[in-house]
Image (tube, rainbow, N blue to C red):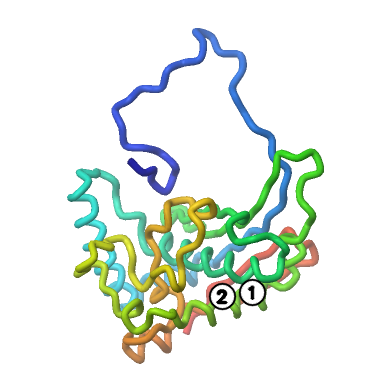
Amino acid sequence: MTPDIEGEYETDVERAEIALDPAWFPAVENRGEGLFVQLRATAVMSWLARPAVKQRLDSLAIGYLHWAKERKSLRLFPGGPYVLLHTLSHLLIQSLAMRCGYPASSIRERIYADTEAQQFGILLYTGSPDADGTLGGLVQQARHIEDHLAQALRMGALSSNDPVCAQHAPGESLEARWLHGAACHGCAPVAETSCEIRNDFLDRALVVPVLGRSPDSRRRAVRCIARTRSDPLQVQSACADG
């Protein structure tokens, strides 16, 4: 049993109350740091309207239907923006881990993809229950977010398993990898302690040009341009057209 993108489980088991009139709840206090990357809603909606993107998302949706049928799940496909943000998040984690002082397994993600409200963002963070918290290495890298985005896109453009990885079609998967597009353990997946949804819903082809795609989809792949404000905690990314 796995949670959905909101962390909820499909189950008919009811949660037991800890008391008739609970006055307390179990909690853990962590101290840490993180950075937030926001994508322009207009750019994401324009990206969704591209024929090549629609075709790719149709293939991912077919793969999801196979997965849902096998598990008798009633959940809906999370949508293209979620797959885009989730894949970009993993690529950024890999880039940040090279310079922030924390291993990739210590950096966690939270994806915000609300198509109806047109709000799209990624939170990458780390935390510790220790009283001293963390050391500021992740926040410091917000000053270099443009470099990390460029490095993430470079890493995502090629996998050690290409062209097999790049040409993987989720709707026609012989390995039953229904929830993956161009994604394998040579590129997009990270440690499951970092991923919010068990390394599912990943596809490099929605983020960067990959081998085996049409010239149009390669030329018009998503480019992410970062705009860093004076405050390193306020990092905003714009997903540009063309």
In the rendered image of this protein, does residue 185 appear above or below residue 164? Answer: above
Q: Image check: 150 left or right of 85? A: right
Q: Please give the name of the residue rendered at 28% of the width and 65% of the height, measured from the top-left corner.
A: 60
Which amino acid is tagged 1?
A: His
For label 1, the crowd category at 10 Å Cα-Cα, with few meaning under 14, some 14 to 19 and many 20 or more, is many
* Residue 78, quarter of the rendered image: bottom left
Q: Which residue is mark 1?
A: 148
- Which quarter of the figure is the N terminus placed in? top left
Front one among 5 and 106: 106
Q: Secondary structure at mark 2?
A: helix
Q: Position of residue 63 (x, y in %)?
A: 24, 62
Q: CA distance from mark 2 to mark 1?
A: 6 Å
Q: Are marks 2 and 1 in contact (CB under 8 Å)?
A: yes
Q: Secondary structure at mark 1?
A: helix
Front one among 55 and 133: 133
Q: Image check: 217 left or right of 99? A: left
Which amino acid is tagged 2?
A: Ala
Q: Position of residue 148 (x, y in %)?
A: 64, 74
Q: Please give the name of the residue rendered at 48% of the width and 53% of the height, measured from the top-left corner.
A: 192
In the rendered image of this protein, does residue 130 appear above or below residue 43? Answer: above
- Residue situated furthest top in the rendering: 20
Does residue 61 show up? no
For label 2, the crowd category at 10 Å Cα-Cα, with few meaning under 14, some 14 to 19 and many 20 or more, is many
Q: Please give the name of the residue rendered at 45% of the width and 79% of the height, measured from the top-left corner.
A: 208
Q: Please give the name of the residue rendered at 47% of the width and 82% of the height, measured from the top-left corner.
A: 157
Front one among 221 and 99: 99
* Residue 186, quarter of the rendered image: bottom left
Q: Position of residue 209 (x, y in %)?
A: 42, 83
Q: Which residue is mark 2?
A: 152
Does residue 124 show up? yes
